[in-house]
Amino acid sequence: MGPPGAGKGTQAKVIADHFGIPAISTGDIFRANVTHGTPLGKKAQEYMDAGEYVPDEVTNLMVRARIDEPDAEPGFLLDGYPRTLSQVEELDGMIRFTGHRLDAVVVLTVDADEIVERLLQRARVEGRADDTEDVVRRRQEVYVEQTEPLIEVYRGRGLVYEIDGMGAVEEVTKRIFDALDAVPQS
Ligand code: AMP
C-alpha cells in the first residue's frame, strides 16, 4: 500500500520476482483491458481517467478471477488492492476460500509534494491519461479518504510493515526485504 506515485508497482515486481510469485496489479489489469477495448476496460476507463476508484463489484470480481489462476496457487503479491474497506472484506472471503492467508501488508510512506512531482514526471515520460495535474491531485485525495483507513485495520491485525519509500529504488527494496525478514513463518 501507499499513495499513488509511492513506487508500489516498481517494488511489487522486485519482491514478487524474489519470491517467485506473481505480482497482481489491479491498475495494470485495468489498463490492459482499456488498451484492448474489452467490456471491463470500457467500464473502468471513465473512473480511471477521473482519478476515481473503479466500483468495488467490478474490481472484486476481477481480482477473484485472477487469484484463481494456477500461477497464483503458491501465493501472490497484490499491488493496488485492496483499496477500500469493502475490498478488504472481499479479499478476506476470497483467501479463506482458496486457503491462502495474508503474511504482510507493506506500506510505503512518502513525502506528498515529492510524489505529485514524481507523477507529473511520469506523465511526461509515459503519457498516462490519469497523470494530469488535476487527476493526480484527485487520486491523492481519494487515497487519503478511502484507502489510508485500511492501514489501521491491518495494523490491528499485526500485519503492517511501514517502509520509508523515499530515496533510490534499490534502497527502498533493501528496506522492504529487511522488514520482510521479520515476518513470522508458518
Ligand atoms: P494504479 O495503477 O494502481 O495507480 O491504478 C490506476 C487506477 O486504476 C486507479 O486510479 C483506479 O481508477 C483503478 N484501480 C486500481 N486498483 C483499484 C482498486 N483496488 N479499486 C478500485 N479502483 C482501482
Image (tube, grey):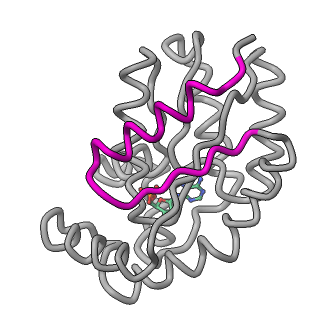
Residue at x-position 66% and y-position 34%: 104
Q: Quadrant of residue 118?
A: bottom left
Work out whether 162 lies above or below 139: above
Residue at x-position 71% and y-position 52%: 57
Give x and y (percent) for residue 123.
22, 72
Work out whether 21 lies above or below 66: above
Work out whether 62 lies above or below 149: above
Using residue 25 as the reference point, say whether residue 65 is left or right of it: right
Q: Nearer the viewer, residue 84 or 16?
A: 16
Please identify the residue farthest to the left as the structure is shown: 125
* Quadrant showing the C terminus: top right
Residue 179 magenta-highlighted: yes
Residue at x-position 66% and y-position 49%: 82
Residue at x-position 51% and y-position 65%: 3
**How many tags in the picture?**
0
Give x and y (percent) for residue 33.
38, 47
Give x and y (percent) for residue 177.
46, 31
Residue 28 magenta-highlighted: no
Give x and y (percent) for residue 90.
79, 42
Q: Nearer the viewer, residue 23 or 127?
A: 23
Using residue 98 as the reference point, say whether residue 172 is left or right of it: left
Using residue 14 as the reference point, say whether residue 91 is left or right of it: right
Q: Nearer the viewer, residue 180 or 48?
A: 180
**What is the span of residues highlighted in magenta in the rendered image?**
159-184
Q: Quadrant of residue 16?
A: top left
Work out whether 76 lies above or below 27: above
